[in-house]
Image (cartoon, rainbow, N blue to C red):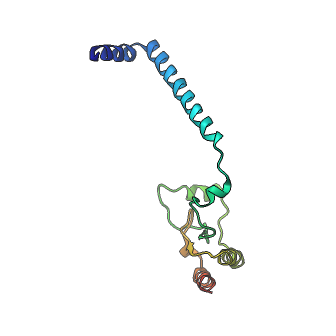
Amino acid sequence: MQKLGWRTYHFVHSNGLAADVVYRIAFHLQRLLRDIRYRSISRSAITPEELWSHRQFGLAGGLITDVTNICNAKCTFCAYPKVVANKTLEAGIMSFAVFQTAVDEWARLGGTQLNLTPVVGDPLVDPGLLDKLDYAVKRASG
């Protein structure tokens, strides 16, 4: 039996046409089995109320925001200098009013975490960063 398995394996992997046929059949068989599993799962419908206890998020737990997209670093791996040079990104600093609106909404919903980790930019470039942080801390604790 072991020789038959080795011979079959060798035949399939040394013959391009046989490999195509075997792998195509395996693909369609796997797809058929997946469809059968999906149909059996979809027949037993789960209501949103049953899913509610298993949710993986909390309402307004955290606010992730960038206060600026300006960056003074010239990192070799970053596209920021090229994007600014091509004028496809408008560089700027978030106004205090916009930050205040976002933080008020976050605090109203019971927010607990504020994340200023930037996607693009350096938060320390913002001259009003300390005022924004003071406001966020007062709103979170109040």
Q: Is residue 84 left or right of residue 15?
A: right
Residue beneath the point at 48% across and 60% down = 75
Residue beneath the point at 66% across and 59% down = 89
| Relative to 129, residue 30 above or below | above
| Relative to 111, residue 137 above or below | below
Quadrant of the snapshot with the C terminus:
bottom right
**Residue situated in front as seen by the camera: 130 or 47:** 47
Residue 6 falls in image quadrant: top left
Percent x, y for residue 79? 55, 55
Quadrant of the snapshot with the N terminus:
top left
Q: How many marks?
A: 0
Residue 18 falls in image quadrant: top left
Percent x, y for residue 21? 49, 16
| Residue 88 in view in this figure | no
Residue at the farthest front position: 44
Percent x, y for residue 117? 53, 68
| Relative to 49, residue 109 above or below | below
Residue beneath the point at 35% across and 18% down = 9
Residue at the farthest left position: 3
Residue 53 falls in image quadrant: bottom right
Percent x, y for residue 51? 62, 56
**Residue situated in front as seen by the camera: 57 or 135:** 57
**Residue situated in front as seen by the camera: 89 or 96:** 96
Residue beneath the point at 61% across and 84% down = 131
| Residue 56 in view in this figure | yes
**Residue situated in front as seen by the camera: 12 or 87:** 12
Q: Is residue 81 left or right of residue 92?
A: left
